Image (cartoon, rainbow, N blue to C red):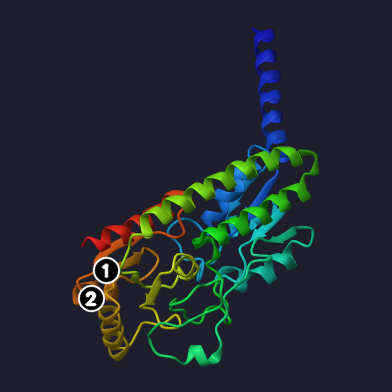
């Protein structure tokens, strides 16, 4: 009996030690949003655990982390920033200050970020031309000091994030370079397949204007020759006069779809959908399953054509 008790005690100690060792040996990399977690997990495989700060259903424009999340960030070996999003602008300096040994990578590095001039900022609702990367006819609003951070909502942006994520993991763990490259190549193939599927859905469209509350699809619109009309005006609810003008612009441009995002107010989107006879569709550009969501958005635009 005594011998059995000793064996159980030893087994318990070994089990506890194994759990503690596993937790200690676990290499954590933190990202800001769920689409980043998707890209990072595809490339990291089983070499790193990916921690996402902004939970599903929360807006990264305004989210404040919990103390537990800040502790998890502190346990990380690196932080992969998305770049210029509200959460990072508000918290990154504090995170850097509190974690001097933490390595930071910017996954938007090398990507042609859209910026808005003061002249564009003063325009009313309508369509504007932007640089070659954004394409023509994309309606764009002032973002975070003049920079639109939503690069993940486009094929080119996703490829830039994937490339920078690959290089981050190679820098963190050079011994597994070949492993990361293999995973990156698989992800790259998936991005190409998603691109082809979206083009197949969108190429036949004759009416290429859509309405969205928060302008999260600016890069997507430019990439696929679409026109994005935004309900939100510089982060604020539109006035009745602005809503009226938006409805008139939507009718002129034969808008067929109004996108609703769960992080934002839906009242004005529902009103505009009624006034313009547009199809109301719920999307989530912050979804973890990036390919599925991007194809869902394209399908909604294709379905809107038949509405």
| Residue 25 position within the rendered picture, expressed as x and y whole percent measured from the top left | 73, 38
- Residue at the image point whose x is 42% and y is 59% from the top: 57
What is the total number of numbered labels drawn onto the structure image? Answer: 2
- Can see residue 288? no
Q: Which quadrant is home to the C terminus?
A: bottom left
Judge from the rendering whether residue 236 lies leftward or rightward of residue 165; answer left or right. Answer: left
For the N terminus, the quadrant is top right
Drawn side of residue 217 relative to residue 192, left or right: left
| Secondary structure under the numbered disc 1 in the rendered image | loop
Q: Residues within 10 Å of mark 1 (few under 14, many from 20)?
A: many
Instruction: Rate crowding at label 2 as few (under 14), some (14 to 19) or many (20 or more) other CA atoms within 10 Å.
Output: few
- The residue drawn where x is 44% and y is 80% is 235
Q: Is residue 283 visible to the viewer in this orientation of the structure?
A: yes
Please give the residue where the numbered disc 1 appears in the rendered image.
256
Residue 186 image-quadrant placement: top right
Residue 139 vs 191, above or below: the answer is below
> Tags 1 and 2 in contact by the CB under 8 Å rule?
no
Residue 29 sits above or below residue 92 on the image: above
Task: Specify whether 126 is left or right of 100.
Answer: left
Q: CA distance from mark 1 to mark 2?
A: 14 Å
Within the image, what quadrant is residue 115 found in? bottom right
Lower sequence index among marks 1 and 2: 1
Q: Please state which of the two labelled residues, at mark 1 or mark 2, is closer to the viewer.
A: 1
Residue corresponding to mark 2: 271
Residue at the location (46% across, 51% down)?
196
Residue 131 drawn at (x, y percent): 56, 77
Residue 28 place in picture, x, y as percent: 67, 47
Identify the element where label 2 is drawn: helix
Residue 73 shows which numbered tag?
Answer: none
């Amino acid at each position: 009996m005594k011998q059995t008790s000793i064996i159980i005690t030893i087994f318990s100690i070994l089990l506890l030690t194994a759990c503690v060792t596993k937790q200690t040996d676990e290499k954590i990399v933190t990202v800001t949003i769920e689409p980043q977690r998707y890209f990072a997990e595809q490339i990291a495989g089983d070499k790193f655990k990916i921690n996402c700060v902004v939970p599903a259903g929360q807006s990264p424009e305004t989210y404040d982390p919990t103390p537990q999340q800040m502790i998890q960030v502190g346990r990380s070996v690196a932080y992969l920033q998305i770049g210029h999003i509200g959460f990072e602008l508000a918290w990154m300096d504090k995170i850097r200050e509190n974690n001097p040994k933490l390595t930071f990578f910017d996954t938007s590095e090398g990507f042609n970020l859209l910026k808005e001039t003061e002249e564009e900022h003063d325009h009313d609702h309508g369509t504007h031309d932007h640089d070659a990367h954004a394409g023509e006819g994309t309606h764009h609003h002032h973002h975070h000091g003049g920079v639109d951070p939503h690069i993940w909502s486009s094929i080119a942006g996703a490829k830039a994030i994937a490339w920078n994520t690959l290089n981050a993991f190679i820098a963190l763990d050079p011994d597994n370079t070949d492993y990361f490259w293999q995973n990156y190549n698989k992800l790259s193939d998936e991005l190409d397949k998603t691109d082809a599927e979206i083009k197949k859905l969108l190429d036949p469209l004759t009416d290429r204007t859509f309405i969205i509350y928060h302008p999260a699809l600016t890069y997507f619109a430019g990439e696929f020759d679409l026109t994005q009309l935004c309900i939100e005006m510089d982060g604020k609810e539109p006035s009745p006069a602005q809503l009226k003008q938006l409805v008139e612009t939507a009718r002129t441009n034969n808008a067929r779809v109004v996108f609703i995002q769960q992080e934002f107010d839906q009242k004005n989107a529902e009103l505009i959908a009624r006034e313009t006879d547009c199809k109301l569709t719920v999307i989530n550009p912050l979804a973890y399953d990036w390919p599925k969501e991007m194809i869902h958005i394209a399908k909604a635009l294709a379905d809107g054509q038949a509405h």
